Image: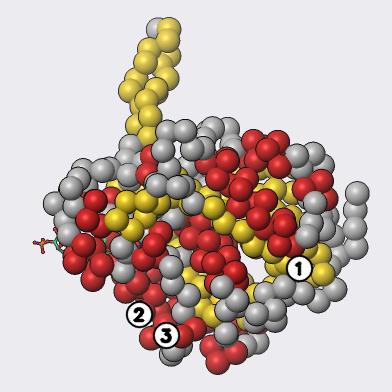
Amino acid sequence: MQYLAAGMAVTGSGSASPAASLDNHGLSQIVDTSDEWIATRTGIRSRHLANAQESLAHLGAIAAQNALSMAQVAATDIDLILLATSTPDDLFGSACQIQAELGAKHAVAFDLTAACSGFVFGLITAAQFIRTGVYRNILLIGADVLSRWVDWTDRRSCVLFGDGAGAVVLQANENDRLLGFALHSDGCLHDCLNVNYKGKARPLTQGMEVAQGTYQPISMNGKEVYRFAVNRVPEVIEKALFQANLSTADIDWLLLHQANQRILDAVAKRLKMPAEKVISNMANYGNTSAASIPLALDETVRQGQIKPGDTIAASGFGAGLSWGAAIFQWQR
Ligand code: UT7
């Protein structure tokens, strides 16, 4: 069915985390590290990790269900389910499994991969469907189980990541609450952060072979990613603000991908934003990739801090490399 073009509003949020968590002391039994090093260099104290029975699709479905309840939207009224993830249970995509679990039988569902930028890229993708009048109710889920791909012998990266899911309901609205955005990619920096596929030649017939293997653990140049984030993130937020005809003084909340507290502090400083406006929950979750922004949004909303009408500057950044920002108001 084709609807009239509309604005978009973020009308509900939800999140979910695996039950088990591992704190820095526990991690120091696995690799040569310490609570002191991890906390001072990253701000992370603990992370939730999914066990072998916990699927990404189930985590995503719980987050989605919570978002639907807050928005008071029935699963059967959802037109589109977008799952931002780099760690699907099924390489063909996990969004359809979430659709089935929710009973969202009228929704089309597909995955979108943009690593830690996935939620922001998904938000802007969803906005195109709503603004052009194609769909009215969209469920956007950011979920990742990076623990499956972490090199648990590499102390430079394994201390950073955690598992989780966050979701938002996006609805057609008379007033457009998405005020501005900017998205970027630079594939020349792909080597800085990746989970590459590596296959071995397997001959099929004479002169014909295929490459079969698996993905390699996360490979990361932490210093380069850090430098990239503190330079590109303030820039992309300013670009999105310019598009929205707003300045940093108009922003109630700075909602960055939860990668490292030092990155959050450096970005806030460059934007001249006070610490009270910076949302941070990485101490308890670590970097949950595509889940980090909706998870932090949901926690802050449920704590009663974010109020209807508040203006939020969200920015995701990570592998690709990719980065983006979206300026939006919470609820109708
Ligand atoms: O979604 C995006 C994902 N990626 C990121 O967000 C990564 C961004 N980068 C960062 O967050 C930081 O670069 C890290 C937290 C990864 C590293 O912090 P750093 O201040 O850049 O540390 P470093 O890599 O320069 O390492 C300093 C020292 C080294 O020892 P030496 O060579 O000076 O003797 C490391 O071997 O700290 C050592 N080190 C550790 N020590 C204890 C590295 N990791 C650890 C560790 N525990 N876990």
On screen, residue 152 versus residue 76, left or right, reads left
How far is disc 2 from disc 3 in space, using C-alphas?
Answer: 11 Å
Q: Quadrant of residue 171?
A: bottom right
Q: Amino acid at mark 2?
A: Ala
Tag 1 residue? 8
On the image, the x and y values in percent for residue 134 come to: 83, 55
On the image, the x and y values in percent for residue 30 come to: 20, 45
Looking at the picture, tell me which residue is in the foreground, 169 or 219.
169
First reached walking from the N terminus: tag 3 or tag 1 = 1
On the image, the x and y values in percent for residue 70 come to: 71, 62
On screen, residue 128 versus residue 97, left or right, reads right
Q: Residues within 10 Å of mark 3 (few under 14, many from 20)?
A: some
First reached walking from the N terminus: tag 2 or tag 3 = 2
Q: Quadrant of residue 128?
A: bottom right
The reply to whether callout 1 and callout 2 are in contact (CB within 8 Å) is no
Q: Amino acid at mark 1?
A: Met
Q: Amino acid at mark 3?
A: Ala
Q: Residue at x 35, y 32 (%)?
A: 198
Q: Nearer the viewer, mark 2 or mark 3?
A: 3
Please tell me whether mark 2 sits on a helix, a strand or a loop. Answer: helix
Q: Quadrant of residue 44?
A: bottom left
Looking at the picture, tell me which residue is in the foreground, 292 or 281.
281
Q: Residues within 10 Å of mark 1 (few under 14, many from 20)?
A: many
Tag 2 residue? 266
Q: Which numbered disc covers residue 275?
A: 3
